[in-house]
Amino acid sequence: MNFSKRIVCSALALLVVFLISCEEEKAAEPKTSSYPRSETLYLSGSQWGDPNTFNLLVETWLVAWPTNDRFNLMYEPLTAYNSLTGATEPILGTLVSYDAEKVVVDIQPEAKWSDGKPVSSADVKFIYELGKRFPQAPTSYVGDFVSEIKVDTVDGKERLSFMVNKKRNNPLVILDQLQAIRIVPAHIFEKYLADNNNDFDAVKKIKCDNNPVVSGPYTLAQYNNERIVLVRRDDYWGNKVLHDGALPVPKYIIHPIYKNNDHFAINLQKGALDASMNYIPRINEKKKDGVNTWYDAPPYFVPGSMHFLYLNNTKAPLNDKNFRRAMAAAIDYAALNRLAVSNYMPEMKPGLIMSEGLEKKYYNAEEVSKHSVPLGDKEYAKKLLEESGYKAVLDDKGNLKHTLGPKGDILPTLLIKSPAGWSDWEAIVNLVVKQLRSVGIDVREGFVDGSQYWPTLPSGEFDIVMRKPPVAVTASLPWNRFNAVLSSRNWRPVGDGNSMNENEGRYNNPAASDYNKRVDELLDIIPLLTDEEEMKAAYTELNNIFLDDQPAIPVCHLPEEFFQFSSKAWTGWPTEKNPFAPPQLPWVGSGINTLWRLAPVK
Amino acid sequence: MLKKYPTVRYVLLRAIWYFLTFLVALSLNFFLPRLGSDPVDIMMAQSSFSSPEIRKQTEENLRKDFGLIILDKEGNILRDEGGNAIKASKFSQLVTYVGQVFKGDLGTSFKNQKPVSEIIMQALPWTIALQFPAILFGWIFGNSLGALAAYKRGVFDKALFPLALLMSSVPFFVFGMVLVYFFGIVWEIFPAVGAYSLELTPGFSLDFLFSVAYHYVLPFLSIFLILAGGQAIGMRSMGIYELGTDYIKYAKWLGLKETRVLAYLFRNAMLPQLTGLALSIGQMVGGALITEMIFSYPGLGMAMLTAIQTNDYPVIQGVTLLITTSVLLANFTVDILIALLDPRVKQSLAMDVK
């Protein structure tokens, strides 16, 4: 037998393979052979596929952590929003004032790029005004909100005035942009553009992964398909100005790239991961392994985002508001909380305004109870359906066969579309289907692949769809949420190729006879209000319209990110008892402050 | 033609058939992903835009980058009367694609703009490193055990057979999860996740190689043991069958040495098993998707899954092309080998010609 030969051959093959694999790593810094656990913070949940580019001029869905989304570890925005206090905290700039005309920000005179050049108004103008030069720039949407940026010098500081563009007339969105838009070094990118004859698409191909010029506390050390490594910049300008001269404690931050949701839980429990932002069921059972959350008891997390059933308001019977209201009443939200989302939800209150936290000041309990259907009241739902002419037809075994409409016609089975494999949503949909069927509404689960789910949203080709409007906890809440659910500004008919990115359920058609123009009026007015009483009145009016018409159904209030952390390697995380930073991973907004407060476990 | 050389004729005919199969598979690989939604639609739906104009502009740019709309010679977008960009027909895309494939260009990923060949080259070594040894050693180990069981019978067989049956009927992802749970989480003997410790920088250092080997154990076992179980059962029944055949009885009557008899037995019992081995090696490049997911192990399976989820046509096409090619090559090789090795097939080839 040539058995031994085979072993030798295979061993050789293996060795070659490893050698090939080893060459993959791209390094910007001189290579370190290892990252000591006591100096390294492991965070995960943002990067899923292979990291591709770190170039901020590329569309955000193509960019790798931490240059995607709103992360401010490498490139920084002007300000950070504190989702706990509602304050706008300074980073590269300080918010001076804002009103219906302009948003004023002073640039930190000490702010510097990693190549020593100061951060200036030219850098801000470069990224904000890029859309004027290149319509395909990812920040081109800014132009609709900011008509121009005026620059003055006040007390030796550069003062920027972001003038509100009357086209959209919305200073609230400009406030959001202060945190969302990361400033890039104009001198570097102008050079890239000049080197490429102003060919924007050519500049987008530059990966910016080799010693990038950044302003933030960390920079890219190395990356491959298994992880991204950041290293601390000890000469970060903000240490002195924003953090009393202290350095962020972890020297390295590693983002492992997992391929399976279970790995977040496994690695948190083993202490191989320090914090993550993914949904992990039954987090309370992991406390014994040192995995903690903001609150020790339910709901464990701070609610920040609403998940909805968006209803197709153009399709019978969903175009009947009584039918929609009956649906909202029939769902047992407490059961959803208990059975589908591991008790992560506070007590469900109807409407688009959260009754706790920063939105509490706009919440009018009395009005809400006047306009809302009673939640989780099946008898009410049955009665409402009956009064509106709907009738449930049962088969011999007493199961729902179909629903008859007011004219005696058999209504089509409504499908609740939801991405397959999103376990929390799947559980919610399964329960909702059961509960709605029990009051005689013919609905079924419609779990589809992501490639089937996403495109049907903007085109409106669905009956009912699970949806989390793309709203992070920012300065513009709850306006942002109302806008996402109710706005008819960009109305397009169902199936139109130019489709809508808000109000995908097509509520309140501007061309219809029953168009309620007050909805869009209020959506336009609220961003311009500064008086708290007026704001509360406007929000209440809008919320009442929502509750009366029930164009969509909020099914649960969940956190913006499921901030869960392990105290096995690092302590000093923010919690309810020690709320020095908001419940976010230390990579976005004011959550980043946590980096200066952590302590390694000895 | 070629009547004097039946084997050559056979090989040529086979080669032509395989080439035709390849062309059909190539077109299927091309059209099947295109039955679903458009990748641009998926990307557009996942991002928000301030106005329909910007949305339309972005969408057109993406379609232009991806070669999904028609351009004139200067690279401008051709439009219909309504001002909408004219979409490229699937057939014209196919022509472009096949042209590129024969030039060795697999295209660029829509999702992350990397050349498809680079994506494959990054993932393939891990896939091969994990699967090739697991398949090869699983096959050798399983067949040896099976043959031994068939020959020895008795207690050895009674213990091995149920065990092998159990191993071959456990779905390998269940077995993988069981391994992770006990060895990775409860007893913490082996790492549960990853291909190497993330504290280390990949490079040619002893620490790194040790870490790779350490992380290799569980994913390897999850494939190796399941495969060995299946092979052992196959080999055992083949062996028992062959032991009862006339030629073995005849060989025994002739009083041949036992080792000689066993050699005859193995040569014949091995043939179907050999086909199985070649096929598994052909299919292996598709990656062990579930194994990769359970262990967060790098490899092609995951690359393909992500591509399918986002309808990243070039990557789907690149990987399926690789799978198609290697499965066809493996099949072809087996066909040829059998024609050369199996006297029965050889005989029938010669008969056909007459």
Image (cartoon, coloured by chain):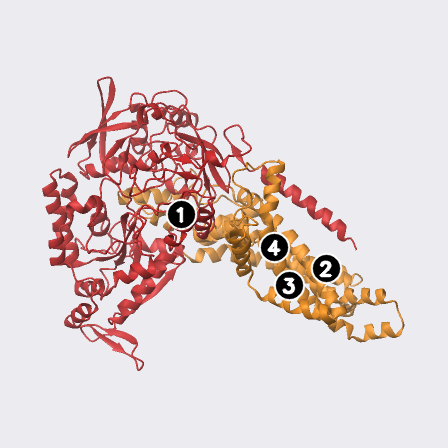
Q: Secondary structure at mark 1?
A: strand
Tell me the residue that label 4 is attached to. Answer: B221
- What's the CA distance linking mark 2 and mark 4? 32 Å
Tag 2, which chain?
B
Tag 3, which chain?
B
Tell me the residue that label 2 is attached to. Answer: B336
Which amino acid, mark 2? Answer: Ile
Tag 4, which chain?
B
Q: Are marks 2 and 3 on the same chain?
A: yes
For disc 1, the neighbor class at 10 Å (few under 14, some 14 to 19, many from 20) is many
From the image, state the color of chain B: orange
Q: Secondary structure at mark 4?
A: helix
Question: Could you say which quadrant of the image residue A465 lies in?
Answer: bottom left
Tell me the residue that label 3 is attached to. Answer: B229
Q: Are marks 2 and 4 in contact (CB under 8 Å)?
A: no
Is residue B95 visible to the viewer in this orientation of the structure?
no
For disc 4, the neighbor class at 10 Å (few under 14, some 14 to 19, many from 20) is some
Look at the picture and state if A456 lies above or below A433: above
Instruction: Look at 54% across and 50% down and name the residue there.
Output: B188
Is residue B96 visible to the viewer in this orientation of the structure?
yes
Which amino acid, mark 1? Answer: Val
Residue A210 position within the rendered picture, expressed as x and y whole percent measured from the top left: 48, 30
